[in-house]
Amino acid sequence: MRYSRISKTLGVAAVATISLTACGGGGDSNGSADGSAVITADTVEPQNPLVPTNTNENGGGVVVEQLFNGLVSYASDGKVENDLADSIESKDNQTWTVKLKADKKFTNGEKITAQSFVDSWNFGAAAKNAQANASFFEPIEGYEAVSAEGSKEDKMSGLKVVDDTTFTVKLTSPQSDFEQRLGYTAYAPMPSTAFKDIKAFGENPVGYGPYKMAKDGAWQHNTSIDLVKNDDYDGPEKPKNGGITFKLYQNPDTAYQDLISNNLDVLQQVPTGALGNYKSDLTDRFSDKPYAGIQSLAVPEYLDNWKGEAGKLRRQALSLAIDRDEVTKVIFNGTRTPATDFTAPTVEGYTADLPNSENTKFDKEKAKKLWAEAEKLQPYNKSEKLTIAYNADAGGHKKWVDAVTNQIKNNLGVEAEGKSYATFKELRTEAKAGELTGATRSGWQADYPSMYNFMAPTFSKGASSNDARYDNPEFEKLLNEGLEAKTTEDGVKKFKEADSTLLKDLPSIPLWYSQANTAWSENVTGVDTGWNGVPEYYKVEKTAK
């Protein structure tokens, strides 16, 4: 799942084909579909108000994606489809001209214009607005001025309105993939009313997308968020149902039980505790599908035990002490694949045997040796017990965290234990503030099918999802060289070098690649997941009763 989302730019435009395993598609309906019926789905309480420029985690992200569509949308395989855009063109990949489809409106009736986009992007980028997704606008000329700490400026020089349906975007350098990244919700337009009181707007957001908020007060905090079909939306994601009620769960096992009882229609991810029996529980009402996601452990470099060369040796030792094969087989029943890098097998450029990938292979003796070397440089402060933070409200993380901490204790002789947070919101707030007291479960669900998108959001200096506070100029240099490469192939080469650098430094420890184990009730059909593992809710149909 998406653990925390923020990005800069995309380096690889090509999309890898995602293969299907087991069942998928939701099966055939035994009765006629009711296009007005509301489906139910699970998520957790969002971390922040539902503002596209400030939502970078899964709890709110899955809701925002239903309410806000932008210039383009992504097909099931990740390919770009025009949505609000009539055309997006450039002769030099640096200055882009965007033309909008005419007569489109937000759900409050306000017309969507070029100014809507320019205002929303400027708002998202400006430091004074402190938006979590600000880094998405970094490639645009003038971002540096508006994003500087303490800056009062709020208009990027690279954005120009030509007329109601046309605006131009000048980037700081040529980037051939600019069009593809525009499907992420950070780039979605907001109406002028949003900027009058952005917090209030986030409680009852107004956008342009397949769905809209059902009414004032549709977000019942910690309980549910009610959406209804937006009849005026005519883009590529037209709903086949009447709306979605997102139930906000604090325990993923509760969501699973609701699904079995047909009190929940679509479950994003079968919890860890049910992976051994969900196929027998559900017969054919599930889909197993690899997607562009990875689970990892971020180890903050601001903690004394993990600083400098000694810290790097200890992180390597931790990685070598983890038997990924055993955890994926015993805890996940083979529904995960041990990771050997920081991206995912479903993106172009992935290589299983990059230089330094040996740091992801289980080797108990080498782990002990590296830990001993670290002790000579800087003795380990045992008063700081090694903890792995995880949230208890989604994903069933406790079981695998317990398994990993036991392996660390048994294979390395280091005391370790899990540290549970009641909600993902609490964990993300502490991680973002740089107040973690140990390691944290981390990872990534890609915004785009690219190697770059796996690395820049989580390891670039200053990125809000850089939980480890990693800072390596050589790594940044390789990423930038990949972005500015003249061909996709040359870009991939540089991204592989950056990936290899991460495998040496290990600011985070790759664990396993993700798989969408989605399930649905007896009441719906047409369930499938997209390239990023998120259910395509607009395709779901409810059987008429």
Image: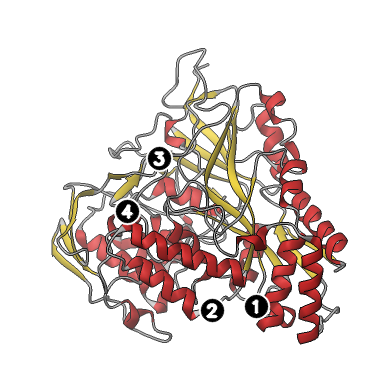
Q: Position of residue 532 (x, y in %)?
A: 48, 46
**Secondary structure beneath label 1:** loop
**Marks 1/2: CA–CA distance:** 9 Å
User: Mark 1 or mark 3, which is nearer the start of the sequence?
Assistant: 3
Q: Report whether 460 appears left or right of 157.
A: right
User: Mark 3 or mark 2, which is nearer the start of the sequence?
Assistant: 3
Reading the image, the residue beneath label 1 is 301
CB under 8 Å between discs 1 and 2: yes
Amino acid identity at mark 3: Asp
Q: Is residue 536 above or below residue 362?
A: above
* Corner quadrant of residue 378: bottom right
**Secondary structure beneath label 2:** loop
Reading the image, the residue beneath label 4 is 180
Reading the image, the residue beneath label 2 is 471
The residue sitting at the left extreme is 163
**Marks 4/2: CA–CA distance:** 27 Å
Amino acid identity at mark 2: Asp
**Marks 4/3: CA–CA distance:** 13 Å
Mark 1 nearby-residue class (10 Å; few <14, some 14–19, many ≥20) = many
Q: Position of residue 158 (x, y in %)?
A: 23, 73
Amino acid identity at mark 4: Gln
Mark 4 or 2: in front is 2
In the image, 425 versus 463, the foreground residue is 463
**Secondary structure beneath label 4:** helix
Q: Is residue 360 visible?
A: yes
Amino acid identity at mark 1: Glu
**Marks 4/1: CA–CA distance:** 33 Å
Q: Is residue 185 above or below residue 430?
A: above
Reading the image, the residue beneath label 3 is 77
CB under 8 Å between discs 3 and 1: no
User: Mark 1 or mark 4, which is nearer the start of the sequence?
Assistant: 4
